[in-house]
Image: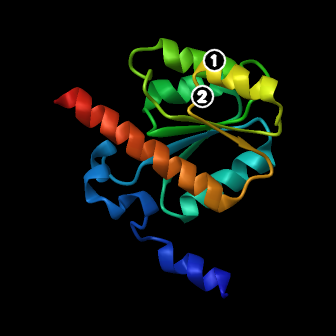
Amino acid sequence: IDLPSLLNTFQGSNYVPILENSEITGIQSGAPKVLVVDDSLSARRSLAEFMSDVGYRVVTARDGMDAVDKLDEELPDVLLVDMEMPRMNGLELTSYVRANPATHNLPIIMITSRATKKHRNEADIAGVNDYLVKPYSENEVLDVVEAQLKRAFEINKTAAN
């Protein structure tokens, strides 16, 4: 596989796997927007670059407080959030998002190194939609993001009717 050539094929294109169903493009104008929240610069950059490479619009935040500022600027279509961060961790950010009527239904996917049942339960209680454990596979992330975007689209479609 010639990975650089494959990636170049999608640069500048509007390729987004979720867009197989053209109705879903109505989530926001253009490709869906992902907010990646992680205090690790390398993890944040890696995930942001991957999501961008497959066609998503990406914004990053270094912790929950930074994410709150980004949410005030423009709402994303999905959040990819680490659990353990300074100032405001992923559980606190999730609680904040769920308590705000404007962001209440945003899909939140927690990506963390914490694999215990206790941590999964804490995430469920806070309102996390999906929970992935690091190291994760890129296909797994794409599958979960697409499923959550489809779910959000159906909720918004039902609410509009």
For the residue marked with disc 2, what is the amino acid?
A: Val
Name the secondary structure under disc 2.
loop
Q: Residue furthest left?
A: 161
**Residue 150 in the image: x percent, y percent?**
39, 46
Image check: 24 left or right of 1?
left
Q: Kindly identify which numbered label has been placed on residue 100.
A: none
Q: Quadrant of residue 27?
A: top left
Q: Residue at x 63, y 52 (%)?
A: 48
Q: Kindly identify which numbered label has been placed on residue 128.
A: 2
For the residue marked with disc 1, what is the amino acid?
A: Ile
Mark 2 closeness class: few <14, some 14–19, many ≥20 residues within 10 Å: many
Of the pair 89 and 147, the residue shown nearer to us: 147
**Residue 157 in the image: x percent, y percent?**
25, 36
Name the residue carrying label 1: 125
Decide: is 127 above or below 111.
Answer: above
Decide: is 49 above or below 63.
Answer: below
Of the pair 93 and 139, the residue shown nearer to us: 139
Q: Residue at x 31, y 59 (%)?
A: 21
Q: Quadrant of residue 121?
A: top right
Q: Is residue 140 visible?
A: yes
Q: Residue at x 52, y 44 (%)?
A: 34
| CB contact under 8 Å: marks 2 and 1 | no
